[in-house]
Image: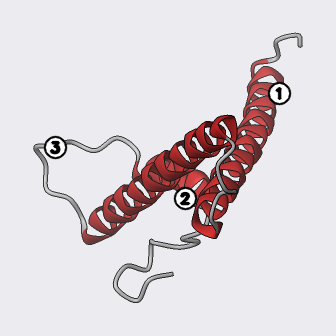
Amino acid sequence: MSARNPEFKNVDRPAYELPALLQRLGTVSFHAAHTAEQRQIAEAARDHAQNLQSNIAAGIDSIGHLLYSSALGDTPPNADRLQHIGLLISHLAVQLEHSIDAAGEMDMFLDWKTEKNGAAK
């Protein structure tokens, strides 16, 4: 959590935090005044999106560099490149985790709606 913005939490999990923040933000109008909370949520979502973009780009670049260097028989990649690849894989795992959670929530939603409406499953 950031002292500047209490909505900016779990900086190491932007792939998980971003969808949750967007869901909390809901539908907002660009032409209407925003509440202080909406502004903090939007700022946190922007910051997580930027972190995610940076980490994914660096990870893809590092994979490319690793493949290129390996093809040339150059020296092994430095620790920074390996760290970027590790972060990319970590973010992909977090995105998978979020999609698993989202699918489970949608199953519960569909089951509840079916039971409430009396429709057959």
Residue in the image at 51% along x and 81% along y:
1
Give the residue type at disc 3: Phe
Q: CA distance from mark 1 to mark 2?
A: 30 Å
To which residue does mark 1 refer? 111
Disc 1 marks a residue whose amino acid type is Asp
Residue at the farthest right position: 121
Residue at position x 78%, y 39% in the image: 100
Classify residue 16 as left or right of residue 44. right
First along the sequence among labels 1 and 3? 3
Front position among marks 3 and 2: 2
Label 1 with label 2: CB-CB less than 8 Å: no
Inspect the image, locate mark 2, and give the three-letter code of the amino acid beneath it: Pro
Give the x, y percent position of residue 65: 56, 44
Q: Nearer the viewer, residue 106 or 2?
A: 2
Regarding mark 3 in the picture, which secondary structure is present there?
A: loop
In 3D space, how far apart are the residues under numbered discs 1 and 3 (Cα atoms)? Answer: 35 Å
Q: Is residue 113 above or below residue 74?
A: above
Question: Which element is circle 2 on?
Answer: helix
Q: Local crowd at mark 1 within 10 Å, few (<14), some, or many (≥20)?
A: some
Density class for disc 2 (Cα within 10 Å; few <14, some 14-19, many ≥20) is many
Q: Indicate whether 51 appears above or below 97.
A: below
- Counting from the top left corner in percent of width and height, residue 85 is at 65, 53
Task: Depth check: give the residue in front, 13 or 28.
Answer: 13
Per the image, the residue denoted by label 2 is: 14
Which of disc 2 and disc 3 is earlier in sequence? Answer: 2
| Location of mark 3 (residue) | 30
What is the residue that sits farthest to the top in this orientation? 120
Q: Earlier in the sequence, mark 1 or mark 2?
A: 2
Against 48, residue 112 (above or below) is above
Question: Quick one: 18 or 109, which is closer to the camera?
Answer: 18
